[in-house]
Image (cartoon, helix red, strand yellow):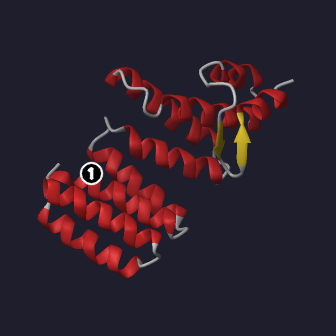
Amino acid sequence: MKHNLRNSLKRVTSLACAKKYAEAWQLLESLRSENAQDEALIWQERGFVYSHANNNDAAISALSKSIELFNKEPNPYYTRGIIFLQSADYESAISDFTRVIELCDFYNSDYYRQSAYFLRADCFVRLKQYDKAKSDCSHVCDGHRSWTDRLRTKEEILAECK
């Protein structure tokens, strides 16, 4: 990825966080026309902006397009999985978090691994698949906490498995 594109994508993120969505969309459109080879990244960023603007359907669609263009990047699966989890589409979330874990193995990277296991365990608990939730929690450090649809801890998830 070119340095200018990276900086521009950071600018889009900043604009979205400041709720300056019109400016973010305008910048994304100009990036799309100038960086056709990096279209998957631009769709991924579109997904972030849509998600930040609470348009989950559009976010899922944009992230799916990013995955369609390049299915070896864990971030769009991870982000889309969180949106599915927060939307109570637990089966789809499990599928995305599973793919994230597979990509962590593929790249021999732990960057998303623990979080993906944690979030997938949360989905399994909600589906009352307690053995799978406990198994996933075995890959998560004690004391781990993360935001799903609320702040959750590993210990809370395990307590729900009894």
Q: Quadrant of residue 161?
A: top right
Q: Is residue 102 left or right of residue 147?
A: left
Can you say whether 110 is above or below 32 in the image?
above
Identify the residue at horizontal 66%, vertical 24% (top origin): 137
In the image, 99 versus 108, the foreground residue is 108
Q: Which residue is mark 1?
A: 40
Q: Disc 1 marks which amino acid? A: Ala
Give left or right: position of 70 versus 127.
Answer: left
Question: Considering only vertical position in the picture, is 110 above or below 10?
Answer: above
Secondary structure state at the residue bearing disc 1: helix
Could you tell me if residue 128 is visible in this image? no
Looking at the image, is 152 positioned above or below residue 157? below
Q: Position of residue 20 (x, y in %)?
A: 41, 79
Q: Nearer the viewer, residue 51 or 1?
A: 1
How far across and how far down the image is residue 155, in percent?
77, 30
Point out the image quarter for the C terminus.
Answer: top right
Task: Answer yes or no: is residue 67 visible.
Answer: yes
Badge count: 1
Q: At which x and y percent is residue 94?
A: 58, 35
Residue at horizontal 56 percent and vertical 47 percent from the top:
82
Q: Is residue 46 left or right of residue 19?
A: left
Farthest-out residue, front: 143
Q: Residues within 10 Å of mark 1 (few under 14, many from 20)?
A: many
